[in-house]
Amino acid sequence: MSNDESKAIFQRLVDDLWNKGNLAAADELFAPSAPNHIPIAPDLPAGPAGAKALASLFHTAFPDLKVSVDRVHAMGDQVAGRLFEEGTHQGDFLGVSGSGKTVDFTKIGLFRIENGKITESWYEFDSLRVMQQIGAIPGAG
């Protein structure tokens, strides 16, 4: 798979699953047994079901979530990108009820891609910043 093809899969993940909230896109993008390594949700099921659960968690908490790609790099069977995300905290997020506050944060996604499908995924995001912005923990200063 070329680097450009891997980048296109990454962009489709952002556009369809994250921005449009099209959960069915996960069925096309993820291999059935693809592990999801997500620290805030360590018990996610593998494959499309895990991707749908993670997207649902964020879209329930931030229904107006907008995700933009800041950078994306591909090499071999891996693609990585830095994302900028923003939305309004209107639903439960990690045990914190909707606050009505606007949040913005960055997230890094790393994916292994084989035969046009995501076969493994990792996300790291600035959860401290989000929890401070929604008032769950005090901010610095």
Image (cartoon, rainbow, N blue to C red):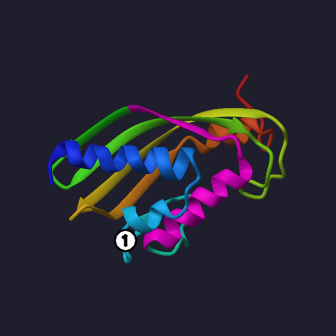
Please state which of residues 133 and 21 is positioned toward the viewer in this rendering. Answer: 21
Q: Which residue is mark 1?
A: 34
Residue 104 % position (x, y): 63, 32
Residue under the image location 37 percent in, 77 percent down? 33
Observer able to see residue 41: no
Asked whether 54 falls inside the magenta stretch, the response is yes
Q: Main secondary structure of the magenta part?
A: helix
Observer able to see residue 4: yes
Residue 106 % position (x, y): 52, 36
Q: Give, as a three-letter code, the residue at label 1.
A: Ala
Residue under the image location 34 percent in, 64 percent down? 120
Residue 31 % position (x, y): 35, 71
Name the image quarter holding residue 72: top left
Please state which of residues 78 and 14 is positioned toward the viewer in this rendering. Answer: 14
Asked whether 63 falls inside the magenta stretch, the response is yes
User: Taking 37 as reference, is 136 left or right?
Assistant: right
Q: In this picture, is 134 found above or below 32?
A: above
User: Taking 65 as reference, is 11 left or right?
Assistant: left
Residue range of the region highlighted in magenta in the rendering: 47-70
User: Taking 141 as reference, is 107 left or right?
Assistant: left
User: Where's the C terminus, which quadrant?
Assistant: top right
Q: How many marks?
A: 1
User: Taking 119 as reference, is 129 left or right?
Assistant: right
